[in-house]
Image: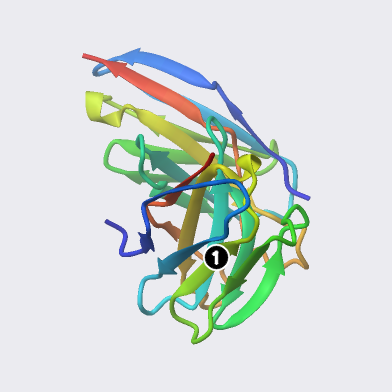
Amino acid sequence: GENVEQHPSTLSVQEGDSAVIKCTYSDSASNYFPWYKQELGKGPQLIIDIRSNVGEKKDQRIAVTLNKTAKHFSLHITETQPEDSAVYFCAAPDSNYGGSQGNLIFGKGTKLSVKP
Amino acid sequence: DTGVSQDPRHKITKRGQNVTFRCDPISEHNRLYWYRQTLGQGPEFLTYFQNEAQLEKSRLLSDRFSAERPKGSFSTLEIQRTEQGDSAMYLCASSLLAGGHTDTQYFGPGTRLTVL
């Protein structure tokens, strides 16, 4: 089945700097990679996702890059702001269950702190 | 607000009691997922439905857990004879499966369960 590793577990940056979070996956058949932001006491919020037919996707200050050969994908946040402070999770489809690719396997999360 | 709602938001119960949680997905979504999240970890898959059919259950899911989605709309998750180890955030997500692509999942705010 799929295994997702996420690094770093904590990340502290100054406001205005960039932040990069990296994830690796094990199943070469995986074709969909979402990123979620979770604030304290709230559910995960989808912020960006990428499918395996593209190498990069951008949405304002957020971008995701995918390297299928190396089986890793990264979240890039530019011009960070204090409101970006949260826990970020990467995920990939789970291939364990009959190939339906329904449920997701999540990384352990990265706690991002943006200092004003 | 993603449009996925969960009730209650918080539940405190004594060990051995039964509890039931409800999830209302985004109205046109045909898939509904249940995940569990413990402190410092990413969400962990429990089970999911496509319309009213329960398609998969986690191999880790205890027999004390049962879920239903009787009319293909809202879903309930029941935990019987609760144990302290059941204390966690229970998350619901919904998605629209279309065109053979891996579906994008949108999460609700979660139900925080504390078993005393």
Report the number of discs: 1
Give the quadrant of residue B3: bottom left
**Which of B76 and B102 lies nearest the eye of the viewer?**
B76
* Residue lying at 65% horizontally and 44% vertically, measured from the top left: A68
Give the quadrant of residue A69: top right
At label 1, counting other C-alpha atoms closer than 10 Å, the crowd grade (few under 14, some 14-19, many 20 or more) is some
Position of residue A15 in the picture relative to residue B116 (left or right) = left
User: What colour scheme was applied to this rendering of the protein?
Assistant: rainbow
Residue A93: % across, % down: 64, 55
Q: Amino acid at mark 1?
A: Leu
Residue B62: % across, % down: 73, 56
Residue B30: % across, % down: 49, 78
Position of residue A55 in the picture relative to residue A25 (left or right) = left
Position of residue B87 in the picture relative to residue B1 (left or right) = right
* Residue lying at 54% horizontally and 21% vertically, measured from the top left: A8
Residue A1: % across, % down: 78, 50
Kindly give the residue lying farthest to the bottom in the view shown. Answer: B71
Position of residue A33 in the picture relative to residue A24 (left or right) = left
Regarding residue A81, the answer to whether it shows in the image is no
Per the image, the residue denoted by label 1 is B77
Regarding residue B24, the answer to whether it shows in the image is yes
* Residue lying at 57% horizontally and 34% vertically, measured from the top left: B41
* Residue lying at 64% horizontally and 67% vertically, measured from the top left: B66
Q: Look at the picture and state if B39 lies above or below A93.
A: above
Disc 1 on helix, strand or loop?
strand
Q: Look at the picture and state if B52 lies above or below A114.
A: below
In the picture, the quarter occupied by the C terminus of chain A is: top left
Kindly give the residue lying farthest to the left in the view shown. Answer: A116
Chain where mark 1 sits = B
